Amino acid sequence: MENRSHALMTGFFTVALLIAAVLAGIWFNRDRTERVPYVIATTESIPGLNPQAAVRYRGLEVGRVDDINFNPAVAGQIVIRLSVDPETPITKTTFAMLGYQGVTGIAFIQLDDEKTGSPLLKSDKNHLAAIPLRPGLLDQLEKRGLAILDKTEKITTKIDGMLTEENQQKIVGAFEKVGKTADAFAEIPKQLEPTIKRMPELTAKAEQSMASFNELSASANKAIKNYDHLATTLQAPNGPITRLTETIDRVGGSLEGVTRDLELETLPHVVSMTDEAKTSLRAVKRTANALSDRPQGLIFGNGAATPGPGEPGFVAPTK
């Protein structure tokens, strides 16, 4: 009996010692830091997030997730309670996202701020401040993946509609035309081969033409230089143009003198000769009139003239 009671006492003592050790460990490992409570209310999915998950501010661990529950007042809304170190700069522009540790899939709350220097967000147990939760990387990838899959499905449907029997025949016909066109292009080098062989000859002729053109240009430049020299010579102060002008001036002066001499010497004689010619013409006119009146005068003569008044044989005219 004594051995049994001793063993029972030993067992009780051992169990009590283990319980005391566990309680002491819990006591010494208890976090005595006072933390500021915050709340996150979201309708987004939070896969992998559990209570006691880490809360990090730009990569630094600043708190823990205290509790995750559904909001009884709003159907489908999840409420996440956080405890954050009071020194963490939680402001009115701070937002939360879900982060994941490596390949384990364990989620944590990642806090960040879109604007530096914003006013601090105050919170306490009686008035919990809310931090907005934005879609995480996986949520964005999921949404974009669904959108991409939707567009891919639409494109596949359109391609399937395009690949009808009629369109397939048209596509095959187009490929055949492309093949014929390629064959036609393959014949072009054969047709150009004679021309390519003549290229050296054509190049030589082109070089000769260029040389002739250069010679012509040189000749033209030389002619232009000679023309410039000739123009300079003609326009010189004592050049041919100046001498010709002086000669013309002298000839003009001589002609002016001759004209003056003609006016002073020859013109009076011309006037006298004109008067004599007028007198002669009058005499010829009288002779012509007499012949017209008495043509027999050429044979019998003019006869005696009719006596005038006071002369013998004058007879006064009668009425």
Image: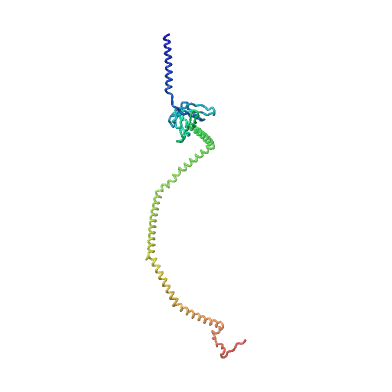
Closer to us: 245 or 51: 51
77 relative to 7, above or below = below
Q: Total marks drawn?
A: 0
| Residue 270 in the image, given as x and y percentages of width and height | 46, 78
| Residue 16 in the image, given as x and y percentages of width and height | 43, 16
Closer to us: 266 or 93: 93
| Residue 261 in the image, given as x and y percentages of width and height | 43, 76
| Residue 223 in the image, given as x and y percentages of width and height | 39, 59
Determine which quarter of the picture holds residue 3: top left
143 relative to 289, above or below = above
Residue extending farthest to the right is 319
Quarter the C terminus occupies: bottom right
Residue extending farthest to the bottom is 312
57 relative to 193, above or below = above
Quarter the N terminus occupies: top left
**Left-right relation of 238 to 37:** left
Closer to us: 75 or 128: 128
Q: How is the image coloured?
A: rainbow
